[in-house]
Image (tube, helix red, strand yellow):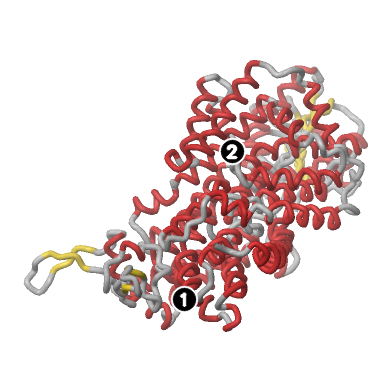
């Protein structure tokens, strides 16, 4: 198959150039018109470089270039012309030609440009999200390439349908048909929950009537009970059967597996996977269409969208350099970045939105990265990028246990504990959780320092100096930056003081409107954000709702609890078990959904076993911050991934595989610090109320 296409209307030049290229080992097709060029490119999909004359009969070279790029944007086009003016070079540059060369030119120069164009082609394909699978073996076809892995797609779908159409597990049938028990009275006459109620962890438990089953409640609460007719022909509501409810529960289990597999491997684009989850929920009737749409549009989704837009505004105004100078001032080396800056980030994220902190700092790290590779004279240093970005992301994640203000998951747990009269105060939560944060941040810094110090190409790196240089170049703060800073301060104040009323999404949408009114951002800026990340977190919210509503989350939690050995059913052993299960589940579900599904089970278990409910509740909430391996666990990961792109080439600096590999290690270390430092150390020393 041809690899080069030569388009020139001068016959002698065309034939001569074609033969000379063939003698140098470059197979090519030589044609005389633009119309023929368009047909040939469609006929030979293997062509990757086009040598195109600017002056052609009929269609001009510029017209041909525009048409070629329309349906083959990855094509590398080298423009040739005997009329070498700067204006023509600029014009072809606007049309995305790879290079401009005057005709006739030296063959060696042309070959050099061809080789550069072919070498650069993978980057262009990545920028346009075009997949190309290497040929040669079944394994290469099976694994495919990023965003298109045929074997993984087929395997995932087979497993999904196997889960959906397998016989319903007897335990799932038991949970879906178990009748809610009535409250019982203790010695003081106070009404309490029956400890033998197996479905106490169901998301709608508190709203269920005595004697009602999950099947019945799920059916009417989500308006899935269809209108039918009785024997007399009178219309009445017909509830879902056990089989119909169980089928939907298994669908959500299959969706959970399929989504996690595709996100972890990059089998298809992130946004498409996110839409696929909704499609499955629609077609299997897990929820009504309006309810699925509502689940995709939760407050957290607007929050993620808003943070991405605000992050773009920060970068556009140059305010990111100012914030970076303030926070990264002590980071005069990689060592100080790891052991001074990361603990500062972790503690800050314990009281402010960790998602916002990550969004604020990511543009600065990208500036540091670009400046570092430029000063080192290298094209890229992926190890440096992975080290900085993941260290920041994981330090922010681990700020979650520090205070109730660190995230919605903590508010969920406070609400669960309040049902038992055991809700901790703000100060008590800080007392039990904040000591974890700086210790874990130091452990994260130590891991990345030891893992990457010998791999990075720019070991002598002064973060503070780079940020100062970038800030100096833009001069003193201007009016736009002051306005942006004021809006950011207002946003943070509203998050801290009014998130209970306004949510996390309301204030950030207000900030976007204000930024637009002051003409700091435009609609075109908003349209350029990473919408696949918004779709991803929307999908996570919808999936969490589906898992909770169908009883799938309860089924998973119940299975885990039943597998626990006796020594893990009370005290620190129970705390370890709950944090272990929460940490696993939060990799696949949002932290809030995880705590909502698991918290109602773990707190009653503490009461039954005689363990302090606060200890178990906090252990579960803390572990919900350990969503390190996949993007869907927390917006931090999604935001960091979305912004981790080389601004010059558009190349993804941190991959899903990086999150999976390093996140798994940090997850293990997070458990180790939680158990060794808090459970068996600090908590034993201070005790619980």
Q: Position of residue 40 (x, y in %)?
A: 67, 44
In the picture, the quarter occupied by the C terminus is bottom right
Report how many numbered discs are placed on residues in the image.
2
Q: Position of residue 527 (x, y in %)?
A: 55, 33
Residue at x-position 53% and y-position 68%: 612
Q: Secondary structure at mark 2?
A: helix
Q: Position of residue 310 (x, y in %)?
A: 59, 33
Residue at x-position 53% and y-position 28%: 523
Residue 490: quarter of image: top right
Q: Is residue 336 above or below residue 287?
A: above
What number is the disc on residue 552?
none
Q: CA distance from mark 2 to mark 1?
A: 45 Å
Front one among 302 and 30? 302
Q: Residue furthest left?
A: 232
Q: Callout 1 environment at 10 Å: few (<14), some (14 to 19), or many (20+)?
A: some
- Closer to us: mark 2 or mark 1? 1
Residue at x-position 88% and y-position 52%: 453
Residue 35: quarter of image: top right
Asked whether residue 40 appears in the rendered view, the answer is no
Residue 620: quarter of image: bottom right
Front one among 433 and 366? 433
Residue at x-position 69% and y-position 33%: 33
Q: Position of residue 432 (x, y in %)?
A: 62, 57
Asked whether residue 253 appears in the rendered view, the answer is yes
Which residue bears the numbered disc 1? 608
What number is the disc on residue 308?
2
């Amino acid at each position: 198959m041809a690899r080069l296409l030569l388009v020139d209307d001068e016959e002698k030049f065309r034939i001569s150039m074609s033969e000379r290229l063939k003698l140098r080992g470059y197979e090519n097709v030589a044609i005389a018109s633009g119309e023929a060029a368009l047909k040939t490119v469609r006929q030979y999909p293997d062509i990757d470089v086009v040598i195109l004359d600017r002056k052609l009969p009929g269609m001009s070279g510029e017209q041909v270039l525009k048409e070629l790029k329309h349906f083959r944007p990855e094509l590398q086009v080298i423009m040739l012309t005997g009329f070498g003016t700067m204006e023509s070079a600029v014009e072809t540059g606007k049309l995305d030609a790879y290079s401009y060369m005057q005709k006739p030119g030296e063959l060696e120069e042309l070959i050099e440009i061809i080789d550069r164009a072919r070498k650069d082609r993978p980057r262009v394909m990545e920028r346009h999200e075009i997949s190309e699978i290497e040929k040669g073996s079944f394994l290469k076809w099976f694994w495919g390439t990023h965003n298109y892995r045929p074997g993984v797609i087929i395997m995932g779908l087979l497993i999904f349908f196997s889960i959906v159409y397998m016989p319903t597990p007897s335990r799932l049938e038991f949970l879906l048909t178990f009748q809610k028990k009535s409250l019982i009275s203790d010695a003081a006459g106070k009404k309490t929950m029956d400890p033998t109620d197996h479905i106490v962890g169901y998301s709608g438990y508190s709203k269920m009537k005595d004697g009602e089953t999950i099947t019945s409640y799920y059916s009417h609460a989500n308006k899935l009970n269809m209108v039918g007719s009785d024997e007399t022909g009178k219309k009445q509501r017909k509830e879902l059967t056990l089989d119909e409810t169980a089928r939907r529960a298994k669908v959500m289990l299959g969706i959970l597996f399929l989504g996690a597999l595709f996100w972890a491997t990059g089998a298809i684009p992130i946004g498409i996977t996110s839409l696929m989850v909704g499609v499955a929920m629609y077609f299997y009737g897990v929820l009504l269409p309006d309810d699925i749409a509502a689940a995709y549009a939760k407050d957290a989704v607007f929050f993620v969208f808003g943070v991405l837009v605000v992050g773009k505004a920060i970068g556009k105004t140059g305010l990111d350099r100012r914030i970076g100078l303030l926070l990264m001032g002590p980071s005069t080396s990689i060592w100080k970045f790891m052991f001074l800056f990361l603990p500062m980030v972790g503690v800050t994220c314990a009281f402010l939105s960790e998602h916002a902190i990550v969004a604020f700092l990511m543009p600065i790290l990208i500036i540091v990265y670009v400046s570092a590779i430029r000063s080192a004279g290298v094209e890229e240093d992926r190890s440096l990028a992975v080290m900085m970005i993941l260290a920041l992301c994981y330090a922010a994640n681990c700020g979650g246990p520090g205070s109730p203000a660190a995230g919605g998951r903590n508010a969920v747990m406070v609400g669960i504990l309040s049902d038992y009269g055991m809700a901790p105060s703000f100060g008590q939560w800080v007392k039990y959780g904040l000591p974890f944060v700086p210790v874990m941040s130091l452990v994260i810094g130590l891991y990345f320092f030891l893992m990457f110090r010998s791999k990075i190409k720019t070991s002598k790196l002064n973060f503070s100096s780079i940020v100062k240089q970038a800030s100096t170049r833009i001069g003193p703060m201007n009016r736009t930056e002051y306005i942006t800073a004021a809006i950011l301060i207002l946003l943070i104040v509203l998050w801290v003081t009014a998130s209970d009323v306004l949510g996390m999404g309301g204030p950030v949408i207000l900030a976007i409107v204000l930024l637009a009114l002051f003409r700091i951002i435009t609609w075109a800026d908003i349209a350029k954000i990473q919408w696949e990340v918004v779709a991803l977190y929307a999908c996570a919210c919808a999936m969490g709702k589906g898992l909770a509503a169908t009883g799938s989350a309860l089924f998973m939690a119940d299975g885990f609890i039943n597998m626990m050995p006796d020594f893990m059913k009370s005290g620190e052993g129970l705390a370890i078990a709950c944090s272990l299960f929460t940490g696993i589940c939060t990799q696949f579900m949002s932290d809030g959904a995880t705590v909502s599904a698991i918290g109602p089970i773990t707190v009653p278990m503490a009461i039954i076993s005689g363990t302090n409910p606060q200890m178990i509740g906090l252990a579960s909430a803390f572990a919900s911050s350990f969503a390190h391996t996949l993007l869907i666990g927390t917006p931090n990961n999604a935001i960091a991934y979305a912004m981790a792109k080389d601004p010059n080439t558009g190349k993804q600096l941190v991959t899903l595989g990086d999150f999976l590999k390093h996140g798994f290690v940090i997850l293990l270390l997070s458990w180790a610090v939680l158990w060794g430092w808090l459970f068996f150390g600090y908590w034993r020393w201070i005790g619980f109320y």
